[in-house]
Image (tube, helix red, strand yellow):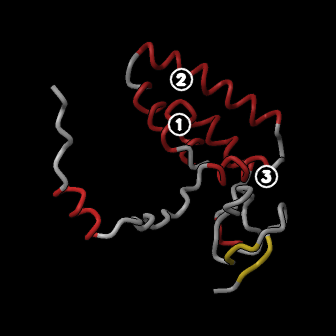
Amino acid sequence: MAMVYCADCGKKISQSAHACPECGAPNRANPAAGEKKWWVAFLLCWFVGMIGGHRYYLRQTASAIVMTVLTCTIVGMVVTSIWNLVDWIILLVHAGDDAYVNRIAAAHTPMPIAPAPVAKKTVKSVKKAVKKPAPKKAK
């Protein structure tokens, strides 16, 4: 596995990594890492923003699901309309800034799960602890 340096923080990362695990910046050495475009997020927000289309695109799946479910009710449609308008304004303020959109997407990229730490106690010490009777109370 080839290692490259993160362009933002300088740490060594895998060339196949989507983002730097240290700073969350997208891996520019891997063009297939899912670079997101500002204009795609903006158009998704405009056309299917009420059901969270732009949030699915930016890997904000939890909030996208909440928007989709809320849209099924009248009150939820009002809430998601306001929520979508705020998202649209934020994307408009960051017009043309693909780096902003990629930071959002990288922040919501699931990191690989690390293996569980090995317990320090051995099976023998655990068995001793189980066999040991509880202390008796003094009368």
Amino acid found under the numbered disc labelled 2: Thr
- Foreground residue, 45 or 70? 70
Instruction: Specify which label sits upstream in the sequence, 2 or 3.
Output: 2
Q: Residues within 10 Å of mark 1 (few under 14, many from 20)?
A: many
SS of the residue under disc 2? helix
- Foreground residue, 40 or 105? 105
Residue under label 2, please give it.
Answer: 80
Residue 9: image quadrant is bottom right
Confirm or deny contact between disc 2 and disc 1 (CB under 8 A).
yes
Residue placed at 72% from the left, 61% from the top?
A: 26
Rendered location of residue 62, percent (x, y): 48, 40
Residue under label 1, please give it.
Answer: 52
Confirm or deny contact between disc 2 and disc 3 (CB under 8 A).
no
Q: Point out the image quarter for the N terminus.
A: bottom right
Residue furthest to the bottom in view is 1
Q: Residues within 10 Å of mark 2 (few under 14, many from 20)?
A: many
Cα distance in 3D space between marks 1 and 3: 19 Å
Horizontally, residue 65 falls left or right of residue 40, namely: left
Instruction: Specify which label sits upstream in the sequence, 1 or 3.
Output: 1
Residue under label 3, please give it.
Answer: 98
- Foreground residue, 44 or 99? 99
